[in-house]
Image (cartoon, helix red, strand yellow):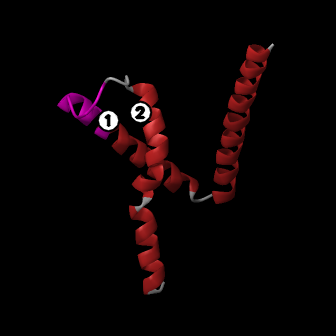
Amino acid sequence: MSASQFLYSIAILLSTPLQLFPAVRIMENGLFAPQKSGKKSVKVKWEKNSFRTLAVVGCSILAWAGAKDLDKFVSLIGSVAWYVLFSTSSASTSSADRACA
């Protein structure tokens, strides 16, 4: 392995929390009440930090476990994303259709 490949892999590894930030932020909005802020409460701050840490560690474990059969892992993630994408878009379309009717 060359030095550039090694540095590239380290950069990807260290950028994982940044890549997960939008998804974790959406999940936080669903789990924590909007009025709860880490600025006002140390307990809420540590709950959110713990949740973020668990999300990163969970995704890392999932990726490590799926590395042996990467094609099956990618297929599984794609099928879940496909279902979520089209089940939420059809639900929003049907509610929009009902609102217009």
Question: Is 38 colored magenta in this rendering?
Answer: yes
Secondary structure at badge 1 equals helix
Q: Do the residues labelled 2 and 1 touch (CB within 8 Å)?
A: yes
Q: Which amino acid does label 2 sit on?
A: Glu
The 10 Å Cα crowd at callout 2, few under 14, some 14 to 19, many 20 or more, is some
Point out the tag, 2 or 1, that comes first from the N-terminus.
2
44 is higher (above) or lower (below) than 25: above
Q: In this view, does 69 lie to the left or right of 63?
A: right
**Residues shaded magenta:** 36-49
Dot label at residue 48:
1
Viewer-proximal residue among 93 and 7 = 93
> Does 9 appear in magenta?
no
What residue do we see at 69% from left, 47% from top?
Answer: 78
Q: How far apart are marks 2 and 1 (CA)?
A: 7 Å
**Residue shown at 59%/59% (left/top)?**
68
Q: Residue farthest to the right?
A: 101
Callout 1 amino acid: Lys
Label placed on residue 99? none
Q: Name the residue under label 2.
A: 28
Front-most of 21 and 99? 99
Q: Residue 31 occupies which quadrant of the picture?
A: top left
What SS does tag 2 mark?
helix
Please identify the quadrant where the C terminus is shown. top right
Q: What residue is shown at x 72% (from left), y 41% (from top)?
A: 82
Q: Is residue 61 above or below residue 50?
A: below
Residue with the most extreme front position: 100
Q: Where is residue 44 in the image (x, y as percent from the top left)?
A: 26, 29
Image coordinates of residue 3 in percent, x first then y, are 42, 85
Residue that appears at 73% across and 21% down: 96
